[in-house]
């Protein structure tokens, strides 16, 4: 029997050791006993980080949706797979059983086929958090199309870049979306994006807000009539273990987002196994992850991980503040949620509201609380523990990334003793390493360095779409033979890990990864801007906020500065999305640069943090005089 469900600490250590000593045997047993395959693998693992090339379960054939849907029909046909909780609390929640989900996925898959979508084609899904988002995702997987879900808060420019990067043939969207008291014109955004996407042949439109939109003849189709005429049965495409399942974009240090490619078998095995253990999911539990399916957290832990375990997973359309800041707690009470997984930025925003709203609701169903997306500060951890978990639900602080596909460092609840701000121990099969500046591994405990992973795990991304070289350079070139995460971390005296934050040009704002380069590129599009640089600074709700230093062209200096600030943020909204707007914009005459012309972000960061005492030696700069000028005019 494999160790699919870990129940105590001794067992964790024993299983962990086994997973490291005999990784192939370990994962083979898990794969064999807990999933259905059309054909078993010839080889469990083949890897070479220098190329890099990683193959899990080579030779195997399967369809992930048969694991998420078909196999549950015998025992769970009437069990709720998805609970849809709408934005408006007065609109009834929808319970979608496994049988209904199976049928709706088949219908959607048949519609995709009727529009000419075949195995290997890319489909862009730009849909708000409504059931069709999960259904479209699974429908792609059903027919072997590669889904590229784009978070429906991204702008038309960001959407167009992502559609073109992987040549999507079809886009799924909605007429609009609800967001608290507001509606968003999604179809309008898609129309704008498609002006620069010649490869898109069809657009399927879900009716959600019943708004007036324009439909382009021959290109745009309302989804519902097509679904109504489609069969509820359909053969799943037989996929090879290493066939791509999806592409998901993440920010990098250059303007072009990275389309991380995840493949089928390893991703399925690892997300399912982590879901079961990290949330200690049991058959009758109701699980809720508040992320959007547009991010990796939603892919792995709203859709695939839960459904592969036959779980009941909540899909929430709304926001934590609507109709008031008690909404999360109301939903937990209403659906008797057992596992609740959210982000530190949400916790901080809710903590600001005081305990009254939490106390109004019965949260006694909760057994496990989760946190993801950025380091959780001590204060937020305690607030979550005291007020939401009532000190009886362990908090799993889960560290992982879009690139890792699944949770990597985390406590296992009721197994690993937790500790505020610590992601604690590596999950089964994960071999972290901390590296110093010279590229030497820091052995033993009480060390701090850059976080790498030494050995492949099943759900790691295999490449960047269309740019394997960039994949190699970004993740496998900093340290020989290791996957470099981009994060810093420390290992304490008992071997617990604490993630200290990004060490590259990515800034995490409200849990969203933002690359500095794409934002700077957007700002530089403004006709009055000559150059710009972005850094993060601490923010009590968002974790980090953005501080921009902007050099204006000569004529720009005569313009009204507040207007310029608005215009700059408007451009950022258009190019990336409102999440990337700057909190502070300082106009300056220069940026500190090294003699080779590189912007010294370290200095700009310190000024933004108001940490002026330790600017360090600036005499080697090309233009040390600008530092004084910037410091003098810094914005509070
Ligand atoms: C950060 C989200 C500290 C980290 C699943 C990582 C965290 C980046 C944690 C990936 C955590 C995520 N503690 N930092 N528990 N979880 N991060 O790709 O910097 O959106 O590299 O994946 O978020 O963000 P991504």
Image (cartoon, rainbow, N blue to C red):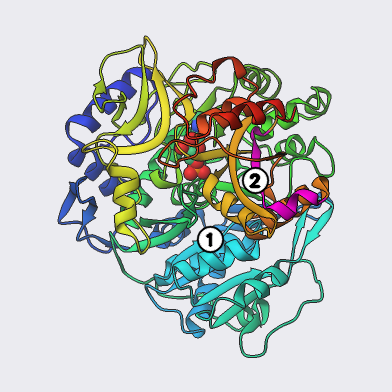
Does ligand 1 reach within 8 Å of label 1's beta carbon? Answer: no
Q: Distance between the residues labelled 2 and 1?
A: 36 Å
Picture residue at 49% right of the left edge, 63% below the top:
148
Q: Where is residue 445 in the image (x, y as percent from the top left)?
A: 32, 13
Q: Position of residue 131 (x, y in %)?
A: 63, 60
Tell me: residue 210, above or below residue 591.
Answer: below
> Which picture quadrant has residue 37?
bottom left
> Disc 2 or 1, which lies upstream in sequence?
1
Answer left or right for 253 relative to 389: left
Q: Position of residue 312 (x, y in %)?
A: 57, 47
Q: What segment is highlighted magenta in the picture?
A: 542-559
Tell me: residue 235, above or below residue 274.
Answer: below
Depth order, front residue of 38/565: 565
> Which picture quadrant has residue 360?
top right
Picture residue at 55% right of the left edge, 38% below the top:
507
**Was residue 119 drawn as part of the magenta stretch in this picture?**
no
Residue identifier under label 1: 149
> Which part of the image, by quadrant, shows the C terminus?
top right
Answer left or right for 92 relative to 548: right
Q: Residue furthest top?
A: 493
> Which picture quadrant has residue 101?
bottom right
Depth order, front residue of 288/71: 288
Residue 79 seen in this snapshot: no
- Sort mark 2 into few (<14), some (14-19) or many (20+) by Cα contacts within 10 Å: many
Residue 469 seen in this snapshot: yes
Tell me: residue 6, above or below residue 317.
Answer: above
Q: Where is residue 188 in the image (x, y as percent from the top left)?
A: 72, 71
Tell me: residue 577, above or below residue 583.
Answer: below
Residue identifier under label 2: 551
């Amino acid at each position: 029997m494999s160790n699919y469900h870990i129940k105590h600490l001794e067992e964790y250590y024993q299983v962990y050791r086994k997973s490291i000593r005999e990784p192939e045997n370990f994962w083979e047993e898990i794969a064999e006993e807990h999933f259905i395959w059309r054909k078993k693998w010839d080889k469990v693992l083949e890897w070479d980080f220098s190329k890099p090339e990683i193959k899990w379960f080579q030779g195997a054939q399967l369809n992930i949706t048969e694991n998420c849907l078909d196999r549950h029909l015998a025992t769970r046909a009437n069990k709720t797979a998805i609970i849809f909780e709408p934005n408006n609390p007065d609109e009834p929640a929808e319970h979608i059983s496994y049988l209904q989900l199976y049928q709706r996925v088949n219908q959607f898959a048949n519609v995709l086929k009727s529009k000419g979508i075949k195995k290997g084609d890319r489909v862009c899904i730009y849909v708000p958090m409504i059931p069709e988002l999960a259904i479209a995702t699974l429908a792609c997987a059903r027919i072997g199309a590669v889904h590229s879900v784009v978070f429906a808060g991204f702008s038309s420019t960001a959407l167009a870049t992502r559609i073109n990067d992987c040549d999507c043939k079809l886009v799924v969207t909605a007429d609009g979306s609800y967001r608290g008291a507001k509606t968003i014109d999604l179809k309008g955004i898609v129309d704008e994006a498609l002006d620069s996407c010649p490869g898109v042949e069809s657009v399927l439109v879900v009716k959600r807000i019943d708004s007036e939109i324009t439909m382009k003849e021959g290109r745009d189709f309302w989804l519902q009539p097509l679904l109504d005429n489609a069969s509820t049965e359909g053969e799943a495409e037989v996929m090879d273990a290493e066939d791509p399942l999806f592409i998901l974009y993440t920010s990098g240090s250059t303007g072009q987002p990275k389309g991380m490619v995840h493949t089928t078998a390893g991703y399925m095995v690892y997300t399912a196994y982590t879901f079961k253990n990290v949330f200690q999911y049991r058959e009758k539990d109701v699980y809720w992850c508040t992320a959007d399916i547009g991010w990796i957290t939603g892919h792995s832990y709203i859709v695939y991980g839960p459904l592969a375990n036959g779980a009941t997973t909540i899909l929430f359309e709304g926001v934590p503040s609507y109709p008031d800041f008690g909404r999360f707690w109301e939903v937990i009470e209403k659906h008797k949620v057992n596992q609740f997984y959210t982000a530190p930025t949400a916790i901080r925003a809710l903590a600001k509201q005081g305990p009254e709203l939490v106390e109004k609701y019965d949260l006694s169903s909760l057994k496990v609380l989760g946190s993801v997306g950025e380091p959780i500060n001590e204060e937020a951890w305690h607030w979550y523990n005291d007020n939401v978990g009532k000190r009886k639900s362990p908090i799993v602080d889960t560290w992982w990334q879009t690139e890792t596909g699944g949770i990597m460092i985390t406590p296992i609840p009721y197994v690993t003793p937790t500790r505020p701000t610590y992601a604690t121990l590596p999950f089964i099969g994960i071999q972290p390493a901390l590296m110093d500046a010279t590229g030497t591994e820091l052995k033993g405990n009480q060390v701090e360095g850059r976080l790498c992973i030494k050995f492949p795990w099943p759900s790691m991304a295999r490449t960047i779409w269309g740019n394997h070289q960039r994949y190699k350079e970004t993740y496998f070139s900093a340290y020989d033979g290791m996957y470099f995460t981009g994060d810093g971390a420390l290992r304490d005296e008992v071997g617990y890990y604490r993630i200290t934050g990004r060490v590259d040009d990515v800034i995490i704002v409200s849990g969203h990864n933002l690359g500095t380069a794409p934002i700077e590129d957007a700002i530089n599009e403004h006709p009055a801007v000559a150059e710009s640089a972005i850094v993060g600074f601490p923010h009590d709700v968002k974790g980090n906020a953005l501080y921009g230093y902007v050099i204006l062209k000569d004529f720009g200096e005569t313009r009204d500065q507040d207007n310029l600030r608005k215009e700059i943020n408007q451009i950022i909204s258009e190019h990336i999305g409102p999440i990337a707007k700057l909190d502070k914009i300082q106009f300056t005459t220069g940026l500190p640069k090294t003699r080779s012309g590189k912007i010294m972000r370290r200095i700009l960061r310190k000024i933004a943090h108001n940490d002026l005492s330790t600017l360090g030696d600036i005499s080697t700069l090309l233009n040390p005089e600008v530092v004084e000028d910037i410091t003098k005019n810094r914005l509070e």
